Amino acid sequence: MSEVLETVVDPEVAAWSVLVAYTAGEGLGFNRAFLLLAEGGQIRGWFGVGPRSREEARELWADLRQRGVLPLDRLTEPDLEAVEAERKRHAATLAALSHDLVTGCGVWRRAFIGRSNHPNPCVRHWVAVLDSRELVVVPLMAGSQPWGVVLADNFVTHAPAYHGTLEAAETLAHYLRAALERTQLLLRFQEEKRRRMLAEHATALLDTARTLAHDLKNPLALAGGLAREIMSAPTADRESFTRRLGIVATAVTRAEQRVAELVAGLASRADGISLGPVEVGALAERVTEAFRPLAASRQVRLLCYHPERPMMAAAAIPSLERCLENLLANALEALGETGGEIQVAVRDEPPWVLLVVADNGLPLPAPLRVDPFAGGITTRRGGSGLGLASVRTLAEAMGGKVEYDETEPGWVRFTLFLRRWS
Amino acid sequence: MTASRLLFVDDEEGFLELYRTAFSRDGYTVETTGTIEGARDRLAQGGIDLVVLDIRLGEVSGLALLREIKAKHSGLPVVLSTAYARYQDDFSSWLADAYVVKSSELGELKQAVRRCLGAAR
């Protein structure tokens, strides 16, 4: 259990795991269990596991027996949807269990069994809500303050809770508290990181918008101004008229290009990709090097060409690495066990930096040739068909594109077009 | 009365063409240059009544030229013209007699030129 909880990153999964251990037959064997957390003067129902009624219990347990399911086996690979469904299933009960933290409530040191005549109103409330004859109450403390409580009972079987079970329940509850504190800390850290990233993105976006506003305003003001001049004072001089119209057309084209760049830039930010200058040659060399042992084991010659001078493109390193890895994996797949050659090349073709991956393996199967990047087409070449689709998604998110051709006989070539960083 | 002589400094030939056409028709004598050096040379010869200066001249800033003009030709009005209002944040731009954001509608620029020439006289 402690190993499972050490790897959990979601507080609900942590709660679910421990409460499953409370209720599993091979665990503590309670019929149901609930976690309540202290929060702002209240102790609130937070998560629950187990059947809600005797009928539901019979159906649930019969189903588990029939399918041979051992709940503890599921802890290592929790089904997030099932966890969420369990939380929703108990929402009404959890809301009903919530109670004000009245004096004396939750300051118990050890687990105990509560009944309907318990002196503490919280315990009486929980016993009443759950209609429980014997309710195991496992307190969780933060210093002298209540942190939470785990409630468990055997409302169907009425099996007694022994001292040893209470001690085991306490141990599990403490594991849970440690896991929850860790996951909540992690969540806070992630939230803080997300906020910082959002702030950075907003700043970068504002900067982009300012630059683009400038770059758009220039050609638009020029085109509009000259158009007005042409309208207000038509010139008989055809050469002058044509020259001015030419200036207007060029300005409009420039504005169009900038708009396209704006859309690509915004798309990359919407996808959470932050672009920066990436030296494509060095990246290509590094990724290719990583594939060299695999290529050698398959008798594939792997070559990488790039200019000595730095080739800077607007990209995100993880995305670009993923693109190249997918293209190399695709090429290796195409060459199979027979061997062959893969060429990786970086070229400058303003306004693009090209990253080319070509192989002399099998040609693309006919269904893939229509749109190799569509995804979902499973062939031997391209594996699941999602690798190439992912390349296109990532390339476009970086404001670039990817193309495929077989113009050179015997070679299949994929070309990534990345915007030059200027 | 002699027509006022305006010097437009902008690295985009299209804008210079626009200014030549629009301001000549309004009766001004228009001279243009695309570089800071060209502006410097022309100003050294004298006879310019007002400068319309783009702030971003390729990779260099027109604000350096603005400071130079105000140091060497203190009475010469300068109208700053640029596509982006952020340059108003640069203290150097405050030396200018007027500040106009580029637009396809030249009315604001023409008004600023008239106002600065009137004040200079």
Image (cartoon, rainbow, N blue to C red):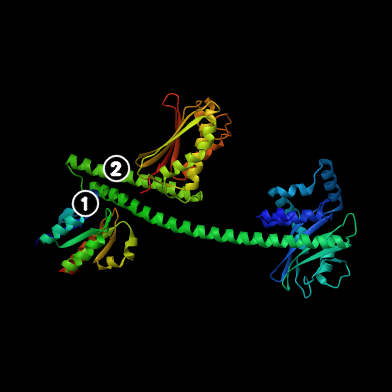
Residue A125, how many percent across, how many down? 82, 67
Considering every residue shown, the one lying at the far bottom of the view is A103
Q: Taking B41 as reference, is A133 left or right? A: right
Residue A178: name its quadrant.
bottom right
**Quadrant holding the N terminus of chain A:** bottom right
SS of the residue under disc 2: helix
Q: Taking A157 as reference, is B105 left or right? A: left
Residue A239: name its quadrant.
top left
Q: Which mark is residue A196?
A: none
What amino acid type is highlighted by mark number 2? Answer: Ala
Q: Taking A181 as reference, is B44 left or right? A: left
Q: Which residue is mark 1?
A: B16
Q: The residue marked by circle 2 belongs to what chain?
A: A
Per the model, the C-alpha gap separating discs 1 and 2 is 16 Å
Q: Which residue is mark 2?
A: A249
What amino acid type is highlighted by mark number 1? Answer: Leu
Badge 1: few (under 14), some or many (20 or more) residues near its Cα, within 10 Å? many
Pick the residue in front: B55 or B114.
Answer: B55
Residue A314, how many percent across, how many down? 41, 47
Q: The residue marked by circle 1 belongs to what chain?
A: B
**Residue at the image point whose x is 85% and y is 45% from the top:** A62
Pick the residue in front: A219 or A344.
Answer: A344
